[in-house]
Amino acid sequence: MDQRSYNQFCATARTLDIVGERWTLLLVRELLTGPKRFGDLQHSLRGLGTGLLAARMKHLEREGLVRKIVLPAPARTPAYALTEAGEELGPAVLALARWGMKWAMGERKEGEAFQAGWAVLALRVGFEPEAAVGLRAVYEFRVSDEVFHARVDDGTIETMHGPAQRPDVVIEMDDDVLVDMGAGRGTLGDAIKRGAARAFGDLEALGRLHGLFRFPRPEARMGGQGAS
């Protein structure tokens, strides 16, 4: 596959030469939450054909952003993981997500795919470090049939797919509640108050939950169709 170039001696242009093709940054997004098998990437990025996915992964390997690994037991299957250079795209991807929450989200469009697991990165975007000073707790989120968790440690956060070994707090909701939150139609606290979500566990950690995450409220771009 021919690689297009802006042909500019500029850091921004050079970066876009590497990650600016369609699907490429979404592949980085998927790998920011941990190694993924080829089939995992196909499942998360429906609409990305097998051939194009293979080509994109070869491109990312060639550019030094992705490397092949073998998952540990019991899986022991080939997978892809980010290199150090790939991991350093994390802040840029999170910044794009934060911008998108404010200026690009709004209502879910007909036919748009949605996976609750994408919230693993969203939790990092909305995390308020100042609200977590002195807090050490693990929060497990059960959204319909997906499970992920966040480990908060004195103002820092680590989020991962899958259940936690010993969660201090468990939050339960269905996909519709998470979609509403993404569209700016309420917060987790609102959902808990009206009974659309449940949270239970350690009382102190539960009490700190309300202030831990703050997400940008969707706004309309000039001439755009976003929520106001």
Image (cartoon, grey):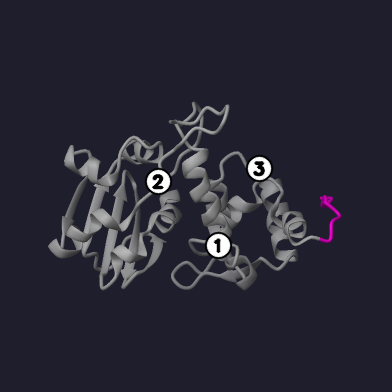
- Magenta-drawn stretch contains 190: no
Q: Secondary structure at mark 2?
A: helix
Residue 164 in sight here:
no
Crowd around label 3: few <14 · some 14–19 · many ≥20 (10 Å): few
Mark 3: which amino acid?
Gly
- Give coordinates of residue 34: x percent, y percent: 50, 64
Mark 2: which amino acid?
Ala
Residue bearing mark 1: 90
- Give coordinates of residue 77: x percent, y percent: 54, 66
Residue bearing mark 3: 49
Q: Residue at x 77, y 59 (%)?
A: 14
Residue 210 in sight here:
yes
Q: Residue at x 35, y 40 (%)?
A: 181
Of the 4 image quadrants, the one containing the C terminus is: top left
**Which of marks 2 and 1 precedes in the sequence?**
1
Say whether residue 188 is left or right of residue 62: left
Depth check, mark 2 against mark 3: the one in front is 2
Magenta region, residue range = 1-9
Residue bearing mark 2: 116
Decide: is 104 above or below 131. Answer: above
- Give coordinates of residue 193: x percent, y percent: 17, 41
Query: Disc 1 to disc 2, how far (Cα)?
Result: 19 Å
- Magenta-drawn stretch contains 3: yes
Mark 1: which amino acid?
Gly
- Give coordinates of residue 45: x percent, y percent: 56, 45
Say whether residue 202 is left or right of residue 163: left
Figure quadrant of residue 93: bottom right
Depth check, mark 3 against mark 1: the one in front is 1
| Callout 2 touching callout 3 (CB < 8 Å) | no
